[in-house]
Each structure stands twice: as structure tokens, then as C-alpha cells.
Amino acid sequence: DIQMTQSPSSLSASVGDRVTISCRASQDISNYLSWFQQKPGKAPKSLIHAASTLHSGVPSRFSGSGSGTDFTLTISSLQPEDFATYYCQLYKSYPHTFGPGTKVEIK
Amino acid sequence: EVQLVESGGGLVQPGGSLRLSCVVSGFTFSNYWMSWVRQAPGKGLEWVANINQDGSEKYYVDSVKGRFTMSRDNAKKSLYLQMNNLRAEDTAMYYCFTFDMWGQGTMVTVSS
């Protein structure tokens, strides 16, 4: 099975900051990677698929990059509504493992 | 409006069974692969199972193989997860999901 790791596990940032979250796969997954946002007590929200394609309605301050084993989610200017936990997920092969998550907290 | 509405969760004893349902509206259900994803209390997301558009292909995480069965009824726009021989570690919120669409989840608690 392909393992997924994320770093950092948590971070503190201020409104307006640029935030970068990393996701690493233990094997090459090409660009078969999605990113999700989850707020406490809520269902996840889909942000990005195919490593860099924003889903409809997702603000342009979110961007994704990477291919192969290393991927990045960037929030260009953190907004109050962006404080949440972010997960990556591979879908190149089964199981479609999620990363452990990165919690973005208010500094 | 796109909606995915899960139901069927509840409290069940270890070894018991539950059948989760997810009824969708607002999109062409029969065109999409569907997934079940779960989240234990205070933990991260865990992919559980996938099913293709006509139900002929199904994939499961190892921890539920042989106990859980995913199915769908395209005429009823419904997705199902039959969960047998439930264990305490199956306690979680269960979400149905496809592409960029999520349900609100249904809680399953396995406890004596």
C-alpha cells in the first residue's frame, strides 16, 4: 500500500499569511491527488483534484502543485474562514489513503 | 441543488450489523464512482470503499474486507453500505462522497 504523510501536522498563522502544506506519497502517484478542507463538526469540503485543479467555487487563493511523490497546498493569503484541517488523498491505486491531516490554527 | 443524505447510523453492539444508505439528488448519480469515507471521533479521514458506476467493481480497505459490502441502486439514486460483524474500531462518522460532493454523515457507534 502507498503511505501518505503530511507536514507540518499543525501550524499557527495570521490572517493574510501565505501558508504552505506538504503531502508526500511513498510511491509515485503521478498527479492522482486531491486536497480537502474540514472544519470542526462539519463534513469535508473538496478543494483540489488532479493535484492542481481547483473544484468549482473554490477561491483562487488556494492552489495545488506537485507530481510524483511530493505535493503542496498553498493558501496565498489566509482568511478567517480558512482555519481548518487539511487532508490530501491519493487515488492512483487502492487503498485511496488519506494523509493524516494538517491543522491550521490562528496565531 | 446537489444533496447527499446519509442515514442508518446508530448504536449497535459488537458483532452486530447496520445498513447505511445515501440518497442523492441534483446530479446524475449513475455517472459517478461513489465512496464511503469514515472518521473516528477526534481522528482523521479514512477511505473505506469505492464502487463504480454500474456496481460491477468494488474496492475496500483491508480492515473491512469480508465484513462490509458496498452496493448501489441507480434507479433509486441510492448508495448502501452493509456492515456486519461490527467492532468497536468501526465507531465513526460515515460519509458518502464523490468527486466534489459530500454528505453530512451518519454516526455509527459500536459499543456494549
Image: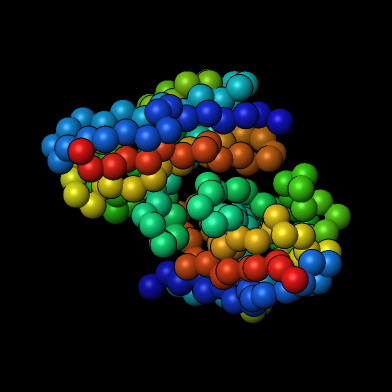
Q: Is residue A44 in view?
A: yes
Quadrant assignment for the N terminus of chain A: top right
Residue in front for this viewpoint, A63 or B39: B39
Quadrant assignment for the C terminus of chain A: top left
How is the model colour-coded? rainbow
How many circles with numbers are drawn on the protein? Answer: 0
A14 relative to A91 in the view: left or right: left
Rendered residue at 48%/61% (across/down):
B102
Q: Farthest residue toward the right?
A: B66
Q: In this view, does B21 lie above or below B101?
A: below
| Quarter where residue A64 is shown | top left
Q: Farthest residue toward the front?
A: B112
Residue in front for this viewpoint, A63 or A20: A20
Rendered residue at 21%/30% (across/down):
A18
| Quarter where residue A40 is shown | bottom left
Q: Is residue A30 in view?
A: no
Q: Is residue B35 above or below residue A53?
A: below
Residue B84 placed where, x, y %?
A: 81, 66
Residue B77 placed where, x, y %?
A: 60, 74
Residue in front for this viewpoint, B15 or A18: B15
Residue B44 placed where, x, y %?
A: 53, 47
Q: Is residue B69 above or below residue A74?
A: below
A26 relative to A17 in the view: left or right: right
Rendered residue at 42%/69% (across/down):
B2
Residue A46 placed where, x, y %?
A: 42, 50
Rendered residue at 79%/67% (across/down):
B14
